[in-house]
Amino acid sequence: MFKHILVPVDGSETSMKAVARAAALAKVFGSEVTLLYVIDPYPFTGVGADFAYGQAQYLSAANAEANAALDAAKQAVAAAGVAEAGTVVGEGHTVHEGVLATVESTGADLVVMGSHGRRGLEKLVLGSVTQRVLSVVKVPVLVVRD
């Protein structure tokens, strides 16, 4: 039914629950799995020498965090019995932009992602990445709640 499952991860327990669900689906359907971590490559708006140094430090730390989260997710997929999972460190000023771009570039036909289930003021202040993904992607999205 699903040939290619995309799983955005952020290293949280909630995203690891989504990884487990995606791995179970991939095993049933024989699907390809791609694990995605999205970083914002240009989070700073300053200029000057301090900006360049801060940017390099940020990118180094962001890539290290991404690789750690992707490695943990890849190990979880392998432990669930799925032979291989691809990994992508995507870029986007917002996570939903990175997810959309990766859906389009990989040809994924299902997105499985976690939701922290924020409500009220917390949701208003922090926003909902899952809600934004639901509003921009044109493939089914399976939301795994915390």
Image (spheres, rainbow, N blue to C red):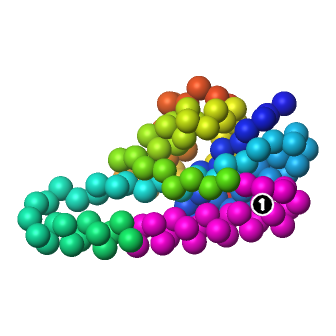
Towards the viewer: 5 or 118: 5
Towards the viewer: 73 or 60: 60
Instruction: Decide: few, some or many residues near mark 1? Use Cα within 10 Å; few <14, some 14-19, many ≥20.
Output: many
| Magenta portion: prevailing SS class | helix
Q: Among all residues in the image, which is located at the extreme right?
A: 28
Q: Is residue 94 magenta?
A: no
Residue at (35, 47) in percent of width and height: 93
Quarter of the figure that contains the N terminus:
top right
Asked if residue 131 can be seen in this view, the reply is: no
In the rendered image, residue 125, in percent from the top left (x then y), is placed at 37, 53
Residue at (28, 57) in percent of width and height: 43
Task: State whether residue 97 is above or below residue 85.
Answer: above
Q: How many numbered discs sit on the rendered protein?
A: 1
Dividing the picture into quadrants, the one containing residue 116 is bottom right
Residue at (59, 67) in percent of width and height: 69
Towards the viewer: 42 or 136: 42
In the rendered image, residue 72, in percent from the top left (x then y), is placed at 67, 69
Quarter of the figure that contains the C terminus:
bottom right
In the rendered image, residue 90, in percent from the top left (x then y), is placed at 48, 50
Amino acid on which the number 1 mark rests in the picture: Val
In the rendered image, residue 110, in percent from the top left (x then y), is placed at 70, 36
Task: State whether residue 87 is above or below residue 104.
Answer: below
Residue 97 relative to residue 142: left or right: left
Q: Among all residues in the image, which is located at the extreme top?
A: 138
Towards the viewer: 57 or 121: 57
- Which residue is under mark 1? 77
Secondary element under disc 1, as helix, strand or loop, is: helix
Q: Which residues are magenta?
A: 61-85
Residue at (74, 68) in percent of width and height: 75
Asked if residue 113 can be seen in this view, the reply is: yes
Task: State whether residue 144 is above or below residue 79.
Answer: above
